[in-house]
């Protein structure tokens, strides 16, 4: 079975988590300091995805659906 995430994804997430621990990781949209571990991982995966790394597509949300 092949791995779900590639090396670039791993490196980007590692870098984002390191920046978060140092307190230098900023959110792209608002520019606020990121303190959440989950958000740091999401930022790392988004960067890897942008650079063509092996990362699964983002999950689709049902927020826009009318019930």
Image (cartoon, rainbow, N blue to C red):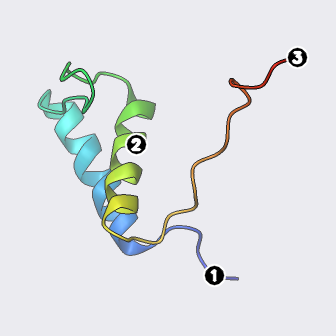
Q: Quadrant of residue 49?
A: bottom left
Q: Quadrant of the C terminus?
A: top right
Q: What residue occupies the far front of the structure in this picture?
A: 66
Viewer-proximal residue among 51 and 34:
51
> Can you say whether 53 is above or below 67 in the image?
below
Residue picked out by circle 2: 41
Which residue shows up at 24% across the image and 33% down it? 28
Give the Cα distance between marks 3 and 1: 38 Å
Which residue shows up at 50% across the image and 64% down it? 55
| Sequence order check, earlier mark of 3 and 2 | 2
Q: What residue occupies the far bottom of the structure in this picture?
A: 1
Which residue shows up at 34% across the image and 49% down it? 44
Residue picked out by circle 3: 67
The percent coordinates of residue 5 (x first, y second) are 51, 67
Q: Secondary structure at mark 2?
A: helix
Q: Secondary structure at mark 1?
A: loop
| Label 3 neighbour load within 10 Å: few <14, some 14-19, many 20+ | few
The percent coordinates of residue 24 (x first, y second) are 11, 31
The percent coordinates of residue 40 (x first, y second) are 34, 37
Q: Quadrant of the N terminus?
A: bottom right
Q: Is residue 52 rendered to the left or right of residue 60?
A: left
In the picture, the disc for residue 2 is 1
| Label 2 neighbour load within 10 Å: few <14, some 14-19, many 20+ | many
| Sequence order check, earlier mark of 3 and 1 | 1
Viewer-proximal residue among 33 and 64:
64
For the residues bearing labels 2 and 1, Cβ distance under 8 angstroms: no
Q: Is residue 17 rendered to the left or right of residue 6?
A: left
> Can you say whether 15 is above or below 25 in the image?
below
In the picture, the disc for residue 13 is none
């Amino acid at each position: 079975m092949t791995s779900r995430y590639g090396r670039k994804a791993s490196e980007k997430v590692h870098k984002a988590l390191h920046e978060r621990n140092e307190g230098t990781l900023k959110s792209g949209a608002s520019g606020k300091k990121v303190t959440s571990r989950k958000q740091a991982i999401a930022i790392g995966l988004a960067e890897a995805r942008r650079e063509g790394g092996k990362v699964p597509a983002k999950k689709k949300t049902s927020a826009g659906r009318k019930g």
